[in-house]
Image (tube, helix red, strand yellow):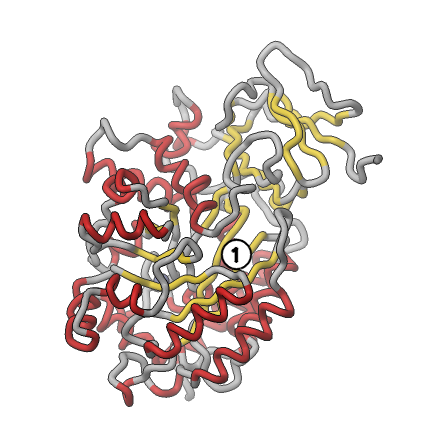
Amino acid sequence: MRSSQPALWLKDPLAILAEDAGRGIVVRDGRIVELVPAGRTPATPEVTAFDAGNHAVLPGLINTHHHFYQTLTRAVPAALDRELFPWLMALYPIWARLTPQTLEVAATAAMAELMLSGCTTTTDHHYVFPAGLEAAIDVEVAAAKRLGLRVLLTRGSMNRSQRDGGLPPDSVVQDEDTILADSLRLIERYHEAGEDAMIQIALAPCSPFSVTTSLMRSTAALAGRLGVRLHTHLGETEDENRYCQEVHRCRPLDYLEQCGWLSDRVWLAHGVHFNAAEMARLAGAGTTISHCACSNQTLASGTCPVCDLEQAGVGVGIGVDGSASNDCSNLMQEVRAAFLLQRGRYGVGRVSHRDALRWATAGSASCIGRPELGAIAVGKMADLALFKLDELRFSGHGDPLAALVLCGAHRADRVMVGGRWVVEGGAIPGLDMAELMQRHAGAARVIQRGPS
Ligand SMILES: [Zn+2]
């Protein structure tokens, strides 16, 4: 069979995070088809060469936790200097003003920022559904398709408001039947199976303090029946521990298990406060953790015990988390933040720059159940991030891959998703960045100010 796409040889990279690929890699039909060792030329016939001599090449970075809509509420004065619960209480009324138009520009901004930082696959966790925003996930799907980013969008939910002892106001929650019906609709309409899937859907009740036990159980049952993944926040703060003890008479992980959620279908955002026995249970179940270093530090939630989790056998990926607690969506900066935080906790012998890069690639791929992503190897999807080291911050560097993390790379020069360039020369072809920023800033002003 003739291939539909000419083979592309990424030739002689400055550095590459792969074994035996000194002369680069060959990409064809959306996949990596050959690694070219030092001193050799490609065995693949009819290759076109791309000179990667100025590029350090990484597997595309994978973001395992985000809330796109929060790019409209960065550094909001009312939420500054607060821990999670009061921070949420300050922001819920602002988020209740989201509309399809403001979400579209927020999601586009978030994904563009991610792509420009070297991200090739992202998740999003959208759980705020005020009246009028019923088609939130449809809006995000359309934005992702326009940008060419690979996504796992989660249909989030909240149905336990202040009226029922939860944290969010009544205006941002939905009832269980509505949530389940929309979850089914979205999976049937958008979820792609297969290794080349560009759009996938998962289900994601928000947290123990904003969702009923009934919805947790019915969501897990639906996900199991339809073969999609499950996501939620867990083990984020001590406040959450206290809430679970008071309301459910157990710790958050016990509650999760009671809801039928301790499984290899599940990845959890944060995982800061698990004890050793709980880590063993997570490992036994195959449940994985999205480590959100910037968000945990901004909200002073604690430090995720990443090395202890990995030693126990728990897979760990990286997430930028929402832009109200990070407050940026730069995944390469998040890699550096995770490296510094975990190096500080565990010491030089246990955490290297390679570990941080591994968390954001193969580790993140395990969180989202996509083993065909997150590595440069034959047969993997051709999702790549290429960085130039020509800025002042890199001047005089030694090891190029270490320099990306240690010197603070934050902008990819080129990004490839499924064999297609989606970032070239540090820009997204077809995206008018000045126009996007103008619309985004306008939307943020409207949503933060409220009705005049
Ligand atoms: Zn979050």
What's the amino acid at mark 1? Met
Estimate the x, y position of residue 13 in percent, counting from the top left: 57, 23
Estimate the x, y position of residue 30 in percent, counting from the top left: 68, 40
Q: Quadrant of the C terminus?
A: bottom left
Given residues 373 and 449, the one toward you in this image is: 373
Query: Is residue 65 placed above or below 447 in the rendered structure?
Result: above
The furthest residue to the right: 2
Residue at the spot 72% in from the left edge and 19% down from the top edge: 43
Name the residue that disc number 1 marks: 111
Residue at the spot 27% in from the left edge and 44% down from the top edge: 309
Residue at the spot 24% in from the left edge and 84% down from the top edge: 165
Query: Is residue 127 placed above or below 364 in the rendered structure?
Result: below
Question: For disc 1, does the CB lie below 8 Å from ligand 1?
Answer: no
Quadrant of the rendered image containing residue 336? top left
Estimate the x, y position of residue 303 in percent, counting from the top left: 21, 50
> Is any part of residue 135 visible from this angle?
yes
Residue at the spot 49% in from the left edge and 73% down from the top edge: 443
From the viewer's perspective, is 71 left or right of 281?
Answer: right
Given residues 303 and 77, the one toward you in this image is: 303
Quadrant of the rendered image containing residue 417? top right
Displayed-image quarter of ligand 1 = bottom left
Given residues 349 and 176, the one toward you in this image is: 176
Quadrant of the rendered image containing residue 426? top right
From the viewer's perspective, is 129 left or right of 79?
Answer: right
Query: Is residue 55 placed above or below 308 in the rendered structure?
Result: above
From the viewer's perspective, is 165 left or right of 199?
Answer: left
From the viewer's perspective, is 385 left or right of 221?
Answer: right
Estimate the x, y position of residue 253 in percent, counting from the top left: 25, 61
Q: Quadrant of the N terminus?
A: top right
Element at label 1: helix
